[in-house]
Image (spheres, helix red, strand yellow):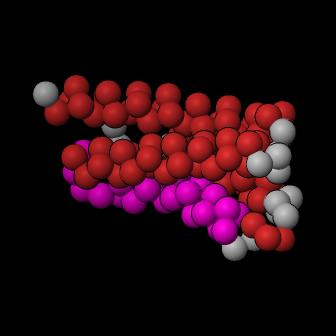
Amino acid sequence: MRGNNTYRDLIVWQKSMDLVEDVYRLTRLLPDEERYALSLQMRRSVVSIPSNIAEGQSRKGDKEFLNFLSYAIGSKSELETQLLICCKLDYFSEKEIEKSMSLCDEISKMIYAITDKLEKIRE
């Protein structure tokens, strides 16, 4: 599954980098009072997604990669929750977070597909 490719060759990593860009754009729109609270938490969550994918893919074993993919899914779920909180607080409309939520769904499906493939290889 890995061959000579690096994490940068993984479409899921590339999509998660697109998500980072989108979330950073969104957090710049948050009110100043959220600059060091919700904004910072959202940025940490979104940066964690490609970071965990990269770290896991760079490790030696599939078991470690699976662990890091699990962390990436957790961070993705945190981010989705934070985006929905922003909607509840009327910081963003559902339309404004649509792209980010769609990327989250796409990234989830890709991570689960990789996870399934790795688990079948391990059996």
Q: Position of residue 56 (x, y in %)?
A: 36, 54
In this view, the residue in front, 115 or 30, is: 30
Total marks placed: 0
Out of 38 and 110, give the one closest to the viewer.
38
Magenta span: predominant SS is helix
Left or right: residue 10 versus residue 88 is left
Q: Taking 38 as reference, is 96 left or right?
A: right
In the rendered image, the residue lying farthest to the left is 123
Q: Which residues are magenta?
A: 37-62
Q: Nearer the viewer, residue 121 or 9?
A: 121
* Placement of 79 over or under 51, stated as above or below: above
| The image quarter in which residue 66 lies | top left
- Report whether residue 3 is seen: no
87 or 41: nearer the eye? 87
Report the quarter where the N terminus lies. top left
Q: Residue at x 59, y 44 (%)?
A: 81
- The answer to if 16 sits in the magenta stretch is no
Residue beneath the point at 49% across and 51% down: 75
Q: Position of residue 6 (x, y in %)?
A: 45, 52
Vertical placement of residue 9 versus 42, above or below: above
